[in-house]
Amino acid sequence: DAGVTQSPTHLIKTRGQHVTLRCSPISGHKSVSWYQQVLGQGPQFIFQYYEKEERGRGNFPDRFSARQFPNYSSELNVNALLLGDSALYLCASSLKTSVNTGELFFGEGSRLTVL
Amino acid sequence: TQLLEQSPQFLSIQEGENLTVYCNSSSVFSSLQWYRQEPGEGPVLLVTVVTGGEVKKLKRLTFQFGDARKDSSLHITAAQPGDTGLYLCAGVNSGNTPLVFGKGTRLSVIA
């Protein structure tokens, strides 16, 4: 069975541009969470979606947005990119609805570099 | 803001040695999770500890949750090069609040 898949795996953008990152959860998982992992840090929670509804949002500016589609895949959008947005963006799927879910299954991440 | 402090930040040891890494907080968590993240991959859940004082074993890895549910430790016996990676602890709260991750301990086991 396929795990969580994310695309693209690597990308380079310049300041001010926008980016869209995509995630497909494990089959049967209806919850998708997004995390930002800056080099040398642990993952920080950005969003959680369940059944296409936002169930949780971390302490990130409005430049960050996300959505979940009927097939439970998800997109993370970041506008007006800043140098500090350079990070590994991780998507995780789970069976549970709450943000403090019992077990998260992470994808390999999308590494974003902002120049 | 709840914080999880992990120590040491970096650890380099020889194959066959034992090691312990720590995860400490001033806050109480309903449970605590340990993940391992290898280069180029996402974190993978190793274990969840729920009860204060609980000890769980996963082959050569022993996880302990502090009695007060504020801290945890991971002990690896006879480390192998395959144990190399970033070890992350994550605190789980009751209610609808997200996981809180520590910064991790980066372990390198040299053959």
Image (cartoon, rainbow, N blue to C red):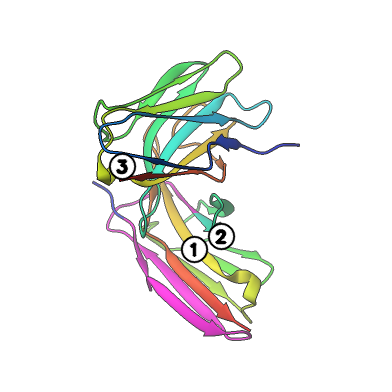
Label 3 crowd bin: few (<14), some (14–19), many (20+), radius 10 Å: some
Chain name for mark 2: B
Question: Residue drawn at (57%, 70%), measured in percent from left and top?
Answer: B84
Chain name for mark 1: B
Amino acid on which disc 3 is placed: Asp
As for residue A20 lying within the magenta part, the answer is no
**Residue annotated with mark 3:** A85
Number of marks in the rendered image? 3
The answer to whether the residue labelled 2 contacts the one labelled 1, judged by CB atoms less than 8 Å apart, is yes
Of helix, strand and loop, which one carries label 3? helix
Disc 3 with disc 1 on a shared chain: no
Amino acid on which disc 1 is placed: Leu
Q: Is residue A53 left or right of residue A86?
A: right
Of helix, strand and loop, which one carries label 2? loop
Question: Residue drawn at (56%, 52%), measured in percent from left and top?
Answer: B41
* In the rendered image, the vertical position of residue A50 relative to residue A112, given as above or below: above
**Residue annotated with mark 2:** B38
* In the rendered image, the vertical position of residue A36 relative to residue A24, given as above or below: below
**Alpha-carbon span between mark 2 and mark 1:** 6 Å
* In the rendered image, the vertical position of residue A40 relative to residue A27, given as above or below: below
Q: Is residue A16 left or right of residue B42?
A: left
The label on residue B86 is 1
**Alpha-carbon span between mark 2 and mark 3:** 22 Å
The image quadrant of residue B72 is: bottom left
The answer to whether the residue labelled 2 contacts the one labelled 3, judged by CB atoms less than 8 Å apart, is no
Q: Which of marks 3 and 1 is in front?
A: 3
The image quadrant of residue A24 is: top right
- The residue lying furthest to the top in this view is A70
